[in-house]
Amino acid sequence: MRWRENLLEKIGALVTAVLLALYVQSQLHPVIERVYDAPIELLNAPPNHEVRLETGSRVRVTVRGVKEQVEQTRAEQIRAYVDLSNAQPGENRLPIRLEYPTEWRGALTIEPSRPTARVNLEPRLSRQLPVRVNLTGIPELQEVLAEAIPEPATVRITGAASQVRRVRTVQITFDMTGLQGDLETESAPTPLDENGAPVLNVQMTPAEVRLKVRLIPQPTSKTVPVSPRLEDLPPFPYRVIWFSVEPVSVQLRGSPRQLAQINVIETAPISLREKTRDAEIRVPLRAPMGVQIVGAKEALVRVRIQREQQPEPPPRPKPPAEPDEPAAPKEEPT
């Protein structure tokens, strides 16, 4: 048969023609790819539950096809979503579905970078917590007492139950360095766990509070009473029945913060171990570190000591009297 003549040459020519056609086609209509970064939508989430995408909230989508068609695509035409209709509390592996124009079907290949998403479903919890203010730094004004008042004083923390339970305090840290007067500012509190680390996966209502910082002038001196420190009481049967101290009060000078913590000044310890009679004792006053005592540096302590009256022992009972022996009978004369 004639068609079998030069069969190998004919096959070679056909293959060459096909390759040439493909080459020409690839040059005229090349196949290219584009990669888009699409956010993952969560559909049909159950009420009163928090949904967390453990594998990230975005997915890369590859669009492959003829250059003319691929170049007409746009990122906003692609929608990636996860359907939570059948999700159960805990961890779920759910498919990532894509939506795009119907004219892309058959002409383009659209593929997500991963077929499924790891989704954690957890009940939602809400708690009301007070806002604490941590003041740091030193204001420019000296001898003042600073206070900070947040408004509102509490915020509501909402989120997955495991995350909300981690929150131990809600805190604002405000640096007063260089502050010259009262100040009002908006500030965002930070939820902290028991170790002081921020808890980020919760929502806070309101997100910001108004912080009022006040600088209250404080006196640099203060008058406090003097208290004698009596130790080692007199030996038995002696006891202290009265004591006095002179002066009864002294004036202190120091920073307002230190003075605010001092309510009394003690004397040095006084030992009465060997005292059996009234005594007058001079002892130095003890000033806290950084505080100065104005005027007297020692005190005169008067102590009155009395011997306790020992109760007299009760009289010893008399021994019972022995009964008299009966008299011998008289003998009658015979």
Image: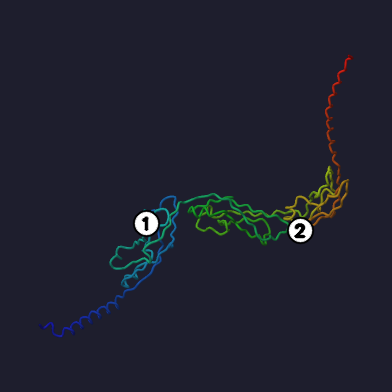
**x, y percentage for residue 38?**
40, 64
Looking at the rendered image, the disc whose residue lies closer to the viewer, 2 or 1, is 2
- Label 1: few (<14), some or many (≥20) within 10 Å? some
Corner quadrant of residue 29: bottom left
Q: Is residue 150 left or right of residue 317?
A: left
Q: Quadrant of the C terminus?
A: top right
Q: Which residue is mark 2?
A: 289
Vertical position of residue 66 compared to residue 263: above or below: below
Q: Residue 122, can we see it? A: yes
Q: Is residue 146 left or right of residue 170?
A: right
Q: Residue at x 85, y 23 (%)?
A: 325
Q: Secondary structure at mark 2?
A: loop
Alpha carbon distance from label 2 to label 1: 68 Å
Vertical position of residue 145 compared to residue 19: above or below: above
State the mark number for residue 83.
1
Out of 180 and 280, give the one closest to the viewer: 280
Mark 2 residue type: Met
